[in-house]
Amino acid sequence: QAAKVSANFVPTKEDYIKVYNRIAQVIDEAGEYDDGSYGPVLVRLAWHASGTYDKDTKTGGSNYATMRFEPESQHGANAGLNVARDLMEKVKQEFPWISYGDLWTLAGVAAIQEMAGPKIPWRPGRIDGFAAQATPDGRLPDATQGADHLRNIFHRMGFNDQEIVALSGAHALGRCHRDRSGFEGPWTFSPTTLTNDYYKLLFDEKWVWKRWDGPKQLEDKKTKSLMMLPTDYVLTQDKVFKKQAKAYAESQDLFFKDFSAVVSRLFELGVPSSQWVTPEPWVMPTVEEQKE
Ligand code: DDH
């Protein structure tokens, strides 16, 4: 039953939990798609909607959900995210009172939490914007580049080196698709569960350049079934990144703690504080916790 959008309908935390639960259902309806979950592609949608932020001009970020509009929806980095946007469009029809920015970031939160990740504190307040607020191409990272590029891109969003490494651990989830990015394959053996395996594998496996006609990527020498992008491998080459990545390889607790904090901030990029409906983010209960 679609909720009415009326001037005096003020959604509560309970209403957002209903949306969270509906997203969790959608995640599970993936059938034969990829590894049987829409979770990873929803995390990627929330990240690409947020990661366009530029702290100097205060443009981009999750506030206006401008990836709904061309040309941002057609930017190379966003190839394949129409899958995630279409899934969320169904949820939007059922809960028309939620903004697209809130919906997409809440989907990222639900996906991470339901895939066994840490709690990602989240709050509503984003508003739907216009095509004129769409961001220029080139604000998201290019997987073929090195440490300087990573720093340029993420420092522009307002993140430091430690946070770059923590954010990169999201690649424990999901996979690359030849017809989207040109790259191919998953980073870990459990792409629908968030773990610190991404860091462990970076150090424990021997990574060699894949011999193929596609873009430069690495494969694990032993099984040849996993991949790393050049930008992933940089975390083992740059001195500062390496130290941090090792720390996350050694402690999933540390990774979860830092990942929770940095992703929560990522999803809030570009939202003026006057828009938040609550001074502190909420911790949304998982579907499992709600049964207790
Ligand atoms: Fe990523 N990512 N990402 N990524 N990403 C891809 C897939 C996924 C880069 C490139 C790619 C983050 C950082 C980086 C996820 C989450 C996050 C793909 C493959 C490429 C390429 C797309 C495809 O073919 O379908 C690069 C480069 C960086 C970087 O330089 C740091 C971050 C910060 C996150 C995050 O969520 C915090 C997820 C999840 C996926 C898997 C998507 C899927 O469909 O599966």
Image (cartoon, grey):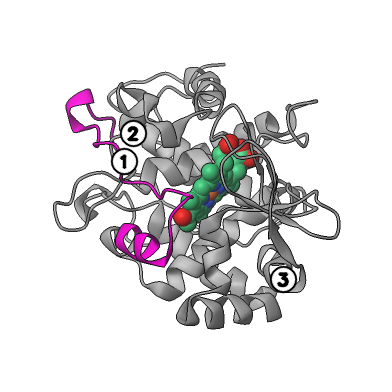
Q: CA distance from mark 1 to mark 2?
A: 9 Å
Q: Nearer the viewer, mark 1 or mark 3?
A: 3
Residue ID at (51%, 58%) = 231
Q: For disc 2, does the CB lie below 8 Å from ligand 1?
A: no
Whole-percent x, y for residue 288 in the image? 75, 50
Residue ID at (66%, 44%) = 174
Bounds of the magenta segment: 126-153
First of labels 2, 3 by sequence position? 2
Residue placed most toward the observer, 263 or 205: 205
What residue type is disc 1 on?
A: Arg
Whole-percent x, y for residue 187 in the image? 69, 53
Residue ID at (55%, 34%) = 19
Q: Is residue 130 covered in magenta?
A: yes
First of labels 1, 3 by sequence position? 1
What residue type is disc 3 on?
A: Lys
Q: Residues within 10 Å of mark 3 (few under 14, many from 20)?
A: some
Q: For disc 3, does the CB lie below 8 Å from ligand 1?
A: no
Q: Residues within 10 Å of mark 2 (few under 14, many from 20)?
A: many
Q: Which mark is residue 65?
A: 2
Is residue 124 positioned above or below 37 on the image?
A: below
SS at mark 3? helix
Residue ID at (39%, 40%) = 49
Q: For disc 1, does the CB lie below 8 Å from ligand 1?
A: no
Q: CA distance from mark 2 to mark 3?
A: 34 Å
Q: Which mark is residue 200?
A: 3
SS at mark 1? loop
SS at mark 2? loop
Q: Which mark is residue 126?
A: 1
Is residue 12 positioned above or below 269 on the image?
A: above
Characterize the magenta stretch by its predominant secondary structure.
loop
